[in-house]
Image: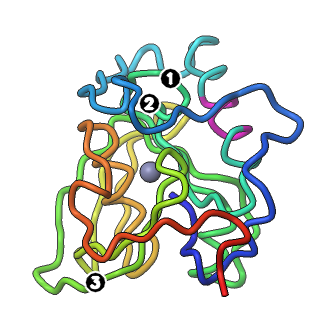
Amino acid sequence: MPISATKTNKKTAQLAGTDVAIVQNGDPILRELAQTVPVADITSPKIKKIIADMKAALASQDDGVAIAAPQIGEPLRIFVVSGAVLAHADPKYKGDDIVFINPELTKLSREKHDVEEGCLSVRWLYGKVKRAQKATIRGYDENGKRVLRGASGLLAQVFQHETDHLDGVLFIDKAYDVRDMPPGSEE
Ligand code: ZN
């Protein structure tokens, strides 16, 4: 997921320093139900490589805050959240990107709000989506350790957007007031 159109200068969609392409809307892999990663495989070279590729693809996008494995062509239940978005929620956070494997949303607040959303795989559409204000997610980290994490605001929105990707759902399925805003198109 990118940060909203109003908060980025959207310099370019070009991949810089990586050959990991981000799959675009229309590719059937974005509509598949992604597969669970066997826990014993989480630390395997194959999964490590996929996670490294996801981080590289995410880092290649100026406005990228998170990416799901199907977005790089891997139909697996993995998503990565940029350390930058975590720093947004907590200015003291200086850590790395966070990886969620086999994530499940265990709790969503009844309180919902309309938030601006876009997608690295649906360039350059933006629209409003109703998302729960708070979300709790459970899964595994990249070391195969169980994690449980609650979030609100942008991070909760990211959890919902990325989990949708793993179920073959794109934000445009739920969005209203959708606008096409390619780089350089804004006022
Ligand atoms: Zn997306």
Question: Can you give x and y, in whole percent of width and height, for residue 154 in the image?
Answer: 45, 76
Residue 44, magenta (yes or no):
no
Magenta-highlighted residues: 51-56
Earlier in the chain: of badge 3 and badge 2, it is 2
What's the residue at 41%, 39% (across, down)?
Answer: 140
What's the residue at 38%, 62% (across, down)?
Answer: 149
User: Could you say whether the residue bearing mark 2 is in a helix, strand or loop?
Assistant: helix
CA gap between label 3 and label 2 equals 26 Å
- Please say if the residues under marks 1 and 3 sit with CB atoms less than 8 Å apart: no
> Disc 3 marks which amino acid?
Asp
Earlier in the chain: of badge 1 and badge 3, it is 1
User: Could you say whether the residue bearing mark 3 is in a helix, strand or loop?
Assistant: strand
Question: Can you give x and y, in whole percent of width and height, for residue 156 in the image?
Answer: 36, 70
Residue on which disc 1 sits: 73
Residue on which disc 3 sits: 114
Please identify the dominant SS of the magenta region. helix
Side (left or right) of 162 relative to 11: left
Residue on which disc 2 sits: 70
> Disc 2 marks which amino acid?
Pro
Question: Can you give x and y, in whole percent of width and height, for residue 104 in the image?
Answer: 24, 47
Give 129 or 90, whichever is nearer the viewer. Answer: 129
Give 109 or 172, whichever is nearer the viewer. Answer: 172
What's the residue at 23%, 27% (across, down)?
Answer: 33
Side (left or right) of 56 relative to 128: right
